[in-house]
Amino acid sequence: MPFKSLCFLLFICYAYSGYTQSETKYPDSVEEKIKQVENNISGWVQIEGVKSVWTLSERMQYYHVNGLSIAVIHNYKLEWAKGYGWADSAKQIPVTTQTLFQAASISKSLNAMGILKLAQENKLNIHDDINNYLKSWQLPKSNFTANKKVTVYNLLNHTAGLNVHGFLGYEKGDSIPSIVQILNGEKPANSEAIRSCAVPGTKVEYSGGGIEISQLILMDITHESYGKYQWDEVLKPLGMANSFYTQPPLKNKMTLLATGYDTNGKEINGKYHIYPELAAAGLWTNPVDLSKFIIETQLSYEGKSNKVLSRSCSQI
């Protein structure tokens, strides 16, 4: 269902600093809302006699969060956005509303929009057998798929009965596998082969591997690179000008990239990992850009906009 009130988008990298970055002066009424967020972070469970409300700074310190960015949507508009902490603590580079973070599995949401655009254009049917669309690789037959085929619909809602939950990424300097090598679990891929492990449609089993198959379907249908298609057909029409799926990252965006940290506050080797698994984990973006995606999805669902998808797509 579409959201009509407030929606928070937070991106986190680890290793705390108390630095805050204020780029825009908002009306007093909005500034008061910002202060409420910064000073009233509460837990899901309230226990009498136990502290249950913290400042944002206190929560950042507790969870070793180096920096984060927040954007708030109110009634289909970006109401405010603000960065906190450091995008790179060693270089003392502050987080701003333009700082780009690796979006991890949020990548899957915009991947779904790209796939549904192909369906809207009658270039695929999401209820067809995926092997009808795969040209450069096929999902191997198995006892699980003998009587029920995997569909694009199954891939997108994690009911395809496929393995490989997620991906580790690759350090700078590592050999980067092709998508076919990833699907086959062949070196230099660092994940196992994508294979059936349950009858399609019988249960929900989160599978980044299944999302990677949808990436190859998109590429085999369009005969384009995944990053180019997503830019031309999804990101650019949405106005997400700073976002991209290209891996390694675009050279003209390097100064905007946030450094990654592990849960102990240690900087990731090379500052971030490279994810050739683009559809599952390859998106670089920020909350301001993501707000445009969310707002457009809301408006499209209500038939008020069709920058990428029309309301009729919800009936596919």
Image (spheres, grey):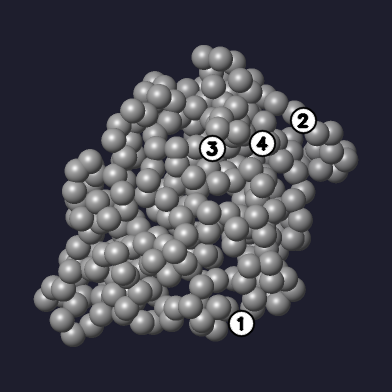
Query: Pointers 4 and 1 in contact (CB under 8 A)?
Result: no
* Alpha carbon distance from label 1 to label 2: 39 Å
The residue sitting at the front extreme is: 223
Tally of marks: 4
Tell which circle, 1 or 2, labels the residue nearer the N-terminal end: 2
Residue at image mark 3: 250
Could you tell me the amino acid type at mark 1?
A: Ser
Tell which circle, 4 or 1, labels the residue nearer the N-terminal end: 4
Q: Is residue 22 above or below residue 283?
A: above
Could you tell me the amino acid type at mark 3?
A: Leu
Q: Position of residue 288 (x, y in %)?
A: 67, 45
* Alpha carbon distance from label 2 to label 4: 10 Å
Q: Position of residue 297 (x, y in %)?
A: 63, 65
Residue at image mark 1: 312
Query: Pointers 2 and 3 in contact (CB under 8 A)?
Result: no
Residue at image mark 2: 23
Tell which circle, 3 or 4, labels the residue nearer the N-terminal end: 4
